């Protein structure tokens, strides 16, 4: 088994001006790269999305620009949200997280100080997501698969398996090991990470998404993950068709 390689599958749906790009995604890296772009331009009401604008250094001359979110109906466009944003020196990207509470069609765009539109993207907000989607599912297509959170992997075996992960002792680092009785049979795996906002809530806080390249004949694979804070987490594993293959849970304590 080889250490799996993260691959970049970054897509965008936007109207581009020069080299500017506007991503609607689940998150972003410290370098301003989008994480899990929303390719179908659709999310569920009550979900948050990251609005990520990237551009070349000094391409936008104004140090103040405006973010607008307009809700579009059959006969008009009505402003739903606006936000003034200052561009820091040598900055090449801006990110803003927004929670869409209401269903409908939206246009998301930035303007310069003179209200000239720089770039835009569209988004459809659909019926609220069912709370059951974040619970353990019997639809896992690999019922015999197992997920271990551990200190290390040696010769296809997890060592130092965690029941809970002690944040202070590990700096939030752990290996996530997925093993199945039969070969996976696909080449792209997506892992999505969710967290409980409160002890009595569902796993309603989106944390991270990663895509990995694997071999169809592999029966196991692993990756290293760093938790940024304590809490109860859910890891959902999907194949390249976005079909859920396994769900696992872990708690990170102080």
Image (cartoon, helix red, strand yellow):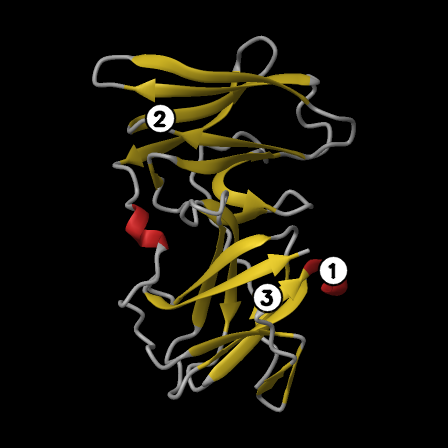
Q: From the viewer's perspective, is residue 44 above or below residue 177?
A: above
> Where is residue 110 shown, x and y percent of the image?
52, 22
The residue labelled by disc 2 is 106
In the image, 36: left or right of 75? Answer: right
Binning the other alpha carbons within 10 Å of mark 3 as few (below 14), some (14 to 19) or many (20 upward) gives some
Give the SS element for disc 3. Answer: strand
Q: From the viewer's perspective, is residue 159 above or below residue 83?
A: below
Measured in 3D between alpha carbons, the distance from the residue under mark 2 to the one under mark 1, in whole angstroms, is: 40 Å
Q: From the viewer's perspective, is residue 76 above or below residue 182?
A: above
In the image, 153: left or right of 202? Answer: right
Measured in 3D between alpha carbons, the distance from the residue under mark 2 to the one under mark 3, in whole angstroms, is: 41 Å
N-terminal label among 2 and 3:
2
In-front residue for pair 130/81:
130
The residue labelled by disc 3 is 164
Q: Which residue is drawn at 34% across and 62% down?
A: 136
> Where is residue 34 shown, x and y percent of the image?
56, 46
The residue labelled by disc 1 is 171
Give the SS element for disc 2. Answer: strand
């Amino acid at each position: 088994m080889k250490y799996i390689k993260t691959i970049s599958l970054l897509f965008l749906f936007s109207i581009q001006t020069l080299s500017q790009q506007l991503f609607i995604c689940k998150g972003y890296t410290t370098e301003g790269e989008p994480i899990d772009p929303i390719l179908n331009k659709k999310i569920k009401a009550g979900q948050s999305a990251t609005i990520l604008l990237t551009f070349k250094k000094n391409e936008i001359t104004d140090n103040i620009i405006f973010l607008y979110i307009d809700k579009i109906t059959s006969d008009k466009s009505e402003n739903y949200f606006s936000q003034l944003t200052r561009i820091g020196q040598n900055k090449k990207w801006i990110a803003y997280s927004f929670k869409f509470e209401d269903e409908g069609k939206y246009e998301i765009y930035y303007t310069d100080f003179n209200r000239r539109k720089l770039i835009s993207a569209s988004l459809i907000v659909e019926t609220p997501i069912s709370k059951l989607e974040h619970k353990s599912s019997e639809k896992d297509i690999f019922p015999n698969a197992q997920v271990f959170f551990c200190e290390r992997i040696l010769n296809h075996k997890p060592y130092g398996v965690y029941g809970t992960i002690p944040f202070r002792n590990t700096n939030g680092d752990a290996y996530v090991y997925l093993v199945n009785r039969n070969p996976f049979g696909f080449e792209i795996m997506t892992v999505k990470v969710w967290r409980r906002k409160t002890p009595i809530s569902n796993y309603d806080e989106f944390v991270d998404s990663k895509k990995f390249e694997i071999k169809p004949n592999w029966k196991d694979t692993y990756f290293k993950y760093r938790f940024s804070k304590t809490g109860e987490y859910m890891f959902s594993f999907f194949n390249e068709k976005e079909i859920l293959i396994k769900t696992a849970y872990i708690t990170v304590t102080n």
